[in-house]
Amino acid sequence: MSKPCIICVAITGSVPQKSDNPAVPISVSEQVDSTHAAFEAGATICHAHVRTDDGAPSSDPDRYAELKEGVERHCPGMIFQVSTGGRSGAGKARGGMLPLRPDMASLCVGSNNFPTRVYDNPPDLVDWLASEMIENDIKPEIEAFDLSHIFQARIMADDGRLKGTPYVQFVMGVKNAMPVDREVFDFYIHTTKRLFGDDAPWCAAGVGRHQITLNDWAIASGGHARTGLEDNIRLDKTTLAPSNAALVRLTVELCAKYDRPVATTKQAREILDLRPA
C-alpha cells in the first residue's frame, strides 16, 4: 500500500492537565513548541484547543489567533484545525474563532453521551457552525461518535449545509459513547465509502489506551490517523508520553509497518482538497 497517511496531532484538548502529565502544553508558547516538534516528527495537521492561564478550557479567539500565527510561522504548510467542541464553550462561542479562517475545524453533527454528561450538539448550533465554515472557507472534520453522525453528514452535504466531501473521523473509546469494536470500525469504513465514495478520506481516533489500536487499524485499512496528548497521555500502561512528538513517532512507525508513506503537507492538502498554504 503506497497511499500517503496523514497524521493529525491533537496537542492539548480540554481535559488533560500538567498534573496528569507535565508534557501537556497549556500556554500558547508551549503549544507552538510542542506542535513544532510534532511537525518535525511527521504530523501534518495540528488539532488545536486553547486554555486560560490556569489551564481551564477556552474558546478565546485571541488565543487561537496567537496560536495560529505561531504554528504558521514555525510549521510551514501545516494544516491548522480548530476545535468547535462543547467542552471549550457554550453556544456560538464555540465558533468564535472561525472568522480567523483556519484550514479546518471539527464539527460534531449530533449529540451523544460523554463520561459524565451529554455532549450537546443541537441542530440549530450545528447548522450555524457549518454555515460559518462555508462562509470562511473552512473544511469541516466530522467527528463521528456514532453511526448516525456519518448519515447526518451525508444529509447536510446533500442539502448544501456542508461544502464538498467532508473529512470523517471515527472517534472510539469514549466512555458511554462508541466502544472500540473492530466490526463496528469496519462498518464505519464501509458506510463512509458507500455514502461519500471509495476515495473519500477518513480518519480514526482512539481515546486513552485505545489510541495505538485505532492508529493501527486505520493505517492498515488505508485511512488516516490521529494521535496526541489530548486523547492519550501515555506511551504504554506504565510510561507517560514525554511529548506529542513521541506519540507521533509511534504513529510513523506504524506507517512503516504497513508500507504507508507519511503524507507531506502538500500531499495532505491535496488529499483533503484544501487551499494551498
Image: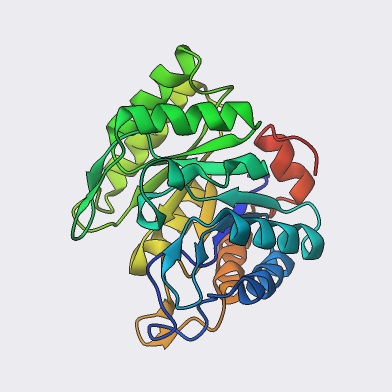
Q: Position of residue 263 (x, y in %)?
A: 70, 50
Front in this rendered view, residue 144 or 194 = 144
Of residues 70 and 166, the one drawn nearer to the viewer in this rendering: 70
Question: What colour scheme has been applied to the protein in the rendered image?
Answer: rainbow
Residue 238 in view (yes/no): yes
Picture layout, residue 166 above or below residue 99: above
Instruction: Tell me the residue at 63%/40% (across/down).
Output: 99
Who's the residue at 41% across and 70% down the image? 56
The residue furthest top is: 159
Task: Answer above or below: position of 180 versus 55.
Answer: above
Whole-percent x and y of residue 220? 50, 50
Left or right, 74 with reference to 158 = right
Q: Quadrant of residue 175?
A: bottom left
Task: Locate the N terminus and report the quarter of the image it occupies.
Answer: top right
Vertical relation: 173 (above or below) 273: below
214 to the left or right of 136? left
29 horizontally vs 275: left or right: left
Residue 105: percent from the left, percent from the top? 55, 43
Instruction: Name the image quarter holding the C terminus.
Output: top right
State whether residue 240 is above or below residue 213: below
Question: Quick check: can you spot residue 222?
Answer: no
Residue at coordinates 35% horizontally, 68% vertically from top-left?
A: 208
Q: Is 100 displayed left or right of 197 in the figure?
A: right
Residue 96, image x, y percentages? 52, 45
